[in-house]
Image (cartoon, rainbow, N blue to C red):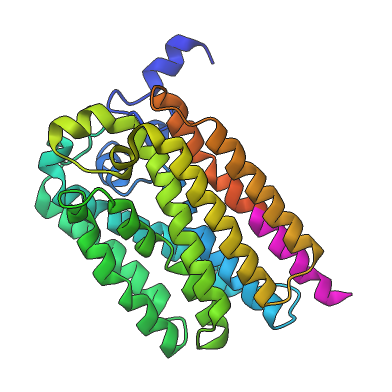
Amino acid sequence: MNDAIDNDAVDPLTLPDADRGNWVDRRAPAAMRPFLKMARVDRPIGWWLLLLPCWWSATLAAIAADRPWPNLAHMALFFVGAVAMRGAGSTWNDITDRNLDGKVARTRMRPLPSGQITVRQALASMALQCLIGLVVLLCFNGFTIWLGIGSLAIVAVYPFMKRITHMPQLVLGLAFSWGALVGWAAAFGALAWPPVVMYAAAVLWTIGYDTIYAIQDLEDDEIAGIKSSAQLFGAHVQAAVGALYAAVVALLALALWGVGTGFAGWLGLAGFAGHLAWQTSGISRDEPVRSLALFRSNRDAGLILLAGLLADALTALL
């Protein structure tokens, strides 16, 4: 396809952190595009990062129970729930941040600050996505249902944290990592210390990768009065993320040891650690475009760890 045709096919309102020519801009009905963008459907990295701790935890549970694979129905439900709740959380974030977003170059063309949809329409969209998430949650045991409901308070307060603390990434991590608890709870109807340690690791992972993401907005955030860990760490941002990532690997190692993970699981953790080291080596406050690419690469890092855990679970067949 030549460049002229390609340009015509791209929505002129394509957001800076979305891939050029993504399927929402190319294929979705025009009336639906603002809602899909508000739900971040054009930027799937968000639901991947929400989903991966769920899948890690479900597979960790399989290893602990000496099963060759995690519950596949649960894995599918986690996928649907992650997409729906990522969309609902993003919509809530955009509703609360609609005035701030208009002051930041990367976000001023989002559907709400640019006037493509109204707050009432956004609330209706969020309600629908929450309903989908509730239907998914009700498919699990009672303990998991209440555990899932418990995360909503964190999700509700997160958008306000960037106004009062330089560590909103910590609150994001507490919410985004909840799946590390839910995956195990769905399998056993209770919690144990290995998934709690995995949850702590996922929280620190989130702080690390979202700090990289926040590098994109350093100048605009200062003007708009938005706080972030990238500002807090300043010139030491690379060392800070490196320290966070080292702690992530150490905590994951403890969780894997706690369930008796074998060679394949440790190999997956080694690959994950190597990927995080590569990310850290590329961090620069002067390269916002590279920061977005490094942030997105965390999907691949998470999949490397998942592959190792799945391979280790399969050894139960031997």
Could you tell me which residue is drawn at 53 percent across and 50 percent down? 245
* Residue 132 in the image, given as x and y percentages of width and height: 35, 68
* Residue 200 in the image, given as x and y percentages of width and height: 47, 66
Q: Is residue 188 magenta?
A: no
Q: Which residues are the magenta region?
A: 305-318
Judge whether 200 appears above or below 36 on screen. below
Q: Quadrant of the N terminus?
A: top right
Could you tell me which residue is drawn at 81 percent across and 76 percent down? 316
Relative to 252, 13 lies left or right: left
Relative to 87, 140 lies left or right: right
Q: Quadrant of the C terminus?
A: bottom right
Relative to 260, 21 lies left or right: left
Please identify the quarter of the rendering in which residue 144 is found. Answer: bottom left
Q: Main secondary structure of the magenta part?
A: helix
Residue projecting furthest to the right: 318
Asked whether the viewer can see residue 104, the reply is no
